[in-house]
Amino acid sequence: MHRFLLTPRWWGINVFVALAVPFCLYMGSWQLGRFEDRVDSHKEANAQQPADQVAAPLDSLLPVDQTTSGRMASTAGEYADQLLVPERRLDGESGFYVLTLLKTDSGKAVPVVRGWLPGVADPAKAPAPPTGRVEVAGALQSAENSGTKGVHSQGGLPAGQLGVIGAAALVNIVPYDLYDAWLTVQTPSDGMTPVPAQAPTNTGLDLKAFQNLGYTGEWFVFVAFVLFMWFRLYRREVETIRDAEAGLLEPAAQ
């Protein structure tokens, strides 16, 4: 009865199933591994808070990548221009960043977010930066992590306010060579709240991580579907042969 499995038609079906099942299992396992890697990176990113890290020289951590983003960096220089970054939320409350340009000994300036204050951005509320030479340590951030929950463009903002933190937004505002990175002080003074370091892009439990988990489920569903369709075709073939042997099928028209 099962000789039909050796026919060319069924050879094709069986070869397809034999290739499709391990392929889907491999792809599902690969997507699951991607999800687990993102979970591990999320745990590593939260294992040690930036404020507990030993600060490394700023230049040694550049350019900013997934490894150095969020690391504590240190540099020295003198504070210069101060800007406000409005519409930044912290713990569910709206407020603004106090950002001050630090002219470093290298000749370049690095934006330093000295802290967060609640309410509407107001220069009168922002504490003046320290004068003279200072040493600054803060969590290193890239321009990509400049905060996407606030204002996205410079147009329409009052003088002294900035929409997006980064060299591209600052180049036409301040007359300094700029680092393509910024620091956020984790122990601010003057009553300001520290701005938590943001995780680098494409790491942690973000949307892409759960997309990987969703793809894992899809590939395993494909395996079940392939096996179900094979069994359904097999059962129909067996029933057809039994009906033919019992004389229950009408002869094919000549």
Image (spheres, rainbow, N blue to C red):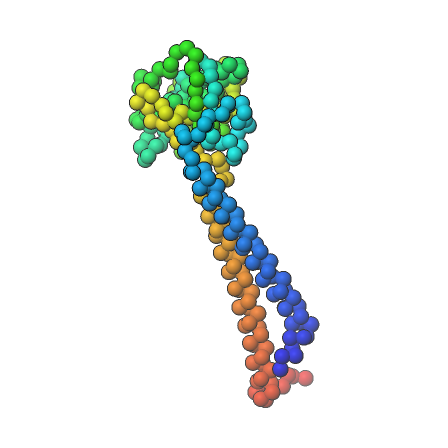
Residue 243 x/y as whole percent: 57, 85
Q: Residue furthest right?
A: 8
Residue 203 x/y as whole percent: 49, 40
Picture mark count? 0
Query: Residue drawn 48% across and 41% down?
Result: 41
Q: Quadrant of the N terminus?
A: bottom right
Query: Residue drawn 50% across and 40% down?
Result: 202
Q: Residue furthest top?
A: 132
- Position of 137 with respect to 9 (left or right) is left
Q: Residue furthest bottom?
A: 247
- Position of 113 with respect to 238 (left or right) is left
Residue 28 visible in this rendered orientation of the protein? yes
- Viewer-closest of 159 and 51: 51
Query: Residue drawn 47% across and 30% down?
Result: 71
Query: Residue drawn 33% across and 17% down?
Result: 127
- Viewer-closest of 16 and 59: 59
- Viewer-closest of 89 and 205: 205
Residue 69 x/y as whole percent: 49, 32
- Position of 155 with respect to 249 (left or right) is left
Residue 121 visible in this rendered orientation of the protein? no
Residue 102, compared with residue 230, is above or below; it is above
- Position of 19 with respect to 131 (left or right) is right
- Viewer-closest of 41 and 153: 41
Residue 49 x/y as whole percent: 41, 33
Q: Quadrant of the C terminus?
A: bottom right
Residue 34, compared with residue 162, is above or below; it is below
Residue 171, compared with residue 197, is above or below; it is above
